[in-house]
Image (cartoon, helix red, strand yellow):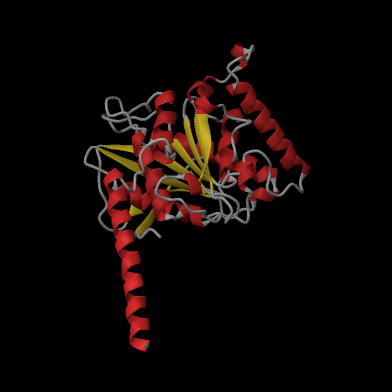
Amino acid sequence: MTYMYPGYEQVPVVSRLSKYSLFVYQEGYGRKSSQVEVPVLFIPGNAGAYKQARSMGTLGNAYATDQFGLRVFTVDSIDELAAFDSALIHEQALFVNDAIRTILDSYSGNSYYKPTSVILVAHSMGGIVAKSLFTLPNYVNGSVNSIITLATPHSYPPVAIEKSMVSLYNTLNQNWKHQLNPSNPLKKSQNKDFDSLMVVSIAGGERDAMIQSKFCELGQIVPPDHGFTIYSTAVKDVWVSADHRCILWCNQLTHSLVRGLYGMIDSRNPTKPIELRERVKGWRNLLEYDFGKKSRILNEGDYGFFFIFFIFFIFFIFFIFFIFFYSLS
């Protein structure tokens, strides 16, 4: 678990979809102020709540320095059951684009730092909302170049009872394959934002009883140079499966997530993220464990120590048994 003192301040958004709201996370105790506060937007999933951003928000504040920090925004999708209705996915995506425009405009009075994009962190069906942004008429060009999804079913809808939802998935995935295909002959029709777009999909594994983790895989949609999929059981310092909601507040996983977000900040030019190749490499180094290297838990000297300890332990057990049976005789 992650402990925090959460607070939320509503941010007015000019949008025709007034049923949704935008909030910014405010740590209630020990809030830090940084010269550069990189905008991060959390998109909840099916029946999700905007307050689910609290673990990321509090750790973002904990890692902040006087120079760099995270400003975590979160969308209130009023607990809609977006997994059952593709129209809700479309409406939420329209609002998210309006929210992104509002977030970027909120930095207009900052003479030192004016970001041009927002990092998206999405849970479950929120990842499908994030993938839908680019084809909508109110999309702000260049506003999204990094998407981190948690337990998002990318390849197939979790509840395929609506024909339009299956159609939405097919259309989205075909469009993404087309845009991210390096051999695409129709370069003129390609959205340039996809050239620098990174997607990292984190799946919960066997404990996620709501989403089959195989649906979270990006292999057929996103090429390796633009992102990858990893299960929480393979994430360094996590090593365990996470259920569908626990993946949002698992302390070890959230620490890795926040460190990855900070790792995308270019200290020389924080207005823009680091290059795509460096972003993907950074996330791989952060999350993936290199089994070809020496163990991070035990070094070579430790193995000898534990071997000697094991031998002494075996002798001790034999000695106890010897004394016990000797006393009986």
Q: Residue shown at 37%/57% (left/top)?
A: 7
**Height in image: 224 above or below 159?**
above
Residue 122 position, x and y percent, is: 51, 44
**Horizontal side of residue 168 vs 21, given as left or right:** right
Image x and y of residue 268, in percent: 27, 25
93 or 313, which is in the foreground?
A: 313
Q: Which residue lies at the image location 54% right of the left edge and 50% below the top edge?
A: 204
Residue 156, can we see it? yes
* Residue 16 visible, this orientation: no
Q: Name the one closer to the observer, 157 or 130.
A: 157
Residue 162 image point, x, y percent: 76, 46
> Which quadrant, please, contains the N terminus?
bottom left
Residue at image point 23% right, 37% down? 67
Q: Is residue 45 left or right of residue 248?
A: right
Q: Is residue 13 left or right of residue 308?
A: right
Q: Nearer the viewer, residue 93 or 181?
A: 181
Q: Is residue 2 above or below residue 203?
A: below
Residue lying furthest bottom: 328
Name which residue lies at 36% across and 30% down. 115
79 over 132 or under it: above or below: below
Q: Where is residue 114 drawn, in percent x and y?
A: 33, 29
The residue furthest front is 329
Indicate the quadrant where residue 137 lies.
Answer: top right
Counting the numbered discs, the total is 0
